[in-house]
Amino acid sequence: MTSSKVLSGLDTAATVYESFNDRIKVLSTKGVVPGLCVVLVGEDPASQIYVRTKSKKLKSLGLVSETIRLDADVTEQKLLSIIEDLNANSKFHGILVQMPLPKHINSQNVINSINPTKDVDGFHPENVGWLSIGKPRFIPCTPKGIMRIFSHYNIDLTGKDIVVIGRSNIVGRPMSILVSSNNANGTCTVCHSRTKNINDYSRNADIIISAIGVPNFLTSEMIKEDSIIIDVGINRIDSDNEKGYKIVGDADYDSVFDKVSKITPVPGGVGPMTIAMLVENTIEAAENIQL
Ligand code: GUN
């Protein structure tokens, strides 16, 4: 039985996908099929899985999805020239370069080269700027998905003390902007690897959003009774099951479960919402094209 404590990303995503049907139909009457091109550099196993999952989902909705796979030693110049072609290719409304990139490539140069109107990740400085002044164009998919979980479960952030753990450009930083925005009205503290004592903050938080990628980091001693935990971690740890590993979040789920009022599971929490929001941003990018 699904506990009422569990904030299901799968259930939320199912509702979100239903809302796409009409939008996809309207576009198709104009002869537009939303299209995404994903660029994957190298062989990182986690990235391979993410990219495959994204592509499968888009195709299942009848959208265009293509993946360009490049060797880990591809030059930055070659990657930039591929993006230049994708910018000019009207079949693709969205371009996503899977992160992280190999060390010899300057990720910021790559992000900067994506046409900001096709930047469905919301990573381009122009889109980061729009978000930070409260007029978002593309909102990064994971933070956007988390906001959608809050609204799906009628969780009002107004006046809530929210601790975001992690300050990445992909999750923590945009998350902190969204929860403290004029729409959400939360009070946000960002903790990170140099925070002196995370417990001092986490123990006073109404809501903790953890995005650090450390398995079982958040334990019951670190949280307040009846707090809400949003677990962004997707961590692979050894297991004696047939696969030899299992996926766990940043929270020690069994340790915190009795104490929290709500929690996102891993898997089945934030992950499916990231993909749903990528689909949404791709549809949005297609809608933004003036025909
Ligand atoms: N790597 C981990 N999450 C993401 C994401 O949302 N977008 C991209 N491009 N790379 C990622």
Image (tube, rainbow, N blue to C red):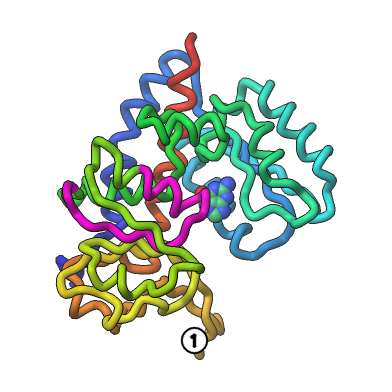
Residue 8 is left or right of residue 196, and the answer is: left
Residue 283 visible in the shown view: no
Establish if 188 lies above or below 250.
above
* Above/below status of 63 relative to 275: above
Is the N terminus in the top left, top right, bottom left or bottom right quadrant?
bottom left
Relative side of 29 to 203, left or right: right
The answer to if 166 sits in the magenta stretch is yes
- Please give the residue where the numbered disc 1 appears in the rendered image: 241
Q: Nearer the viewer, residue 280 or 60?
A: 280
- Identified at 74% across, 27% down, the residue is 85
In the figure, is residue 30 to the left or right of 126?
Answer: left
Query: Vertical placement of 237 versus 146: above or below?
Result: below
Answer few, some or many: residues within 10 Å of disc 1's Cα (few below 14, many 20 plus, some between 14 and 19). few
Is 138 placed above or below 44 here? above
**Numbered marks: total:** 1
In x, y percent, where is residue 79?
77, 40
Q: Which residues are magenta?
A: 158-177
Residue at image point 49% right, 20% down: 32
Q: Which residue is at 68% across, 29% downward?
A: 86
Residue visible at 33% across and 80% down?
A: 219
Q: Is residue 148 magenta?
A: no
* Quarter holding residue 73: bottom right
User: Viewer-proximal residue, 221 or 263?
Assistant: 221
Residue type for callout 1: Asn
| SS type, badge 1 | loop
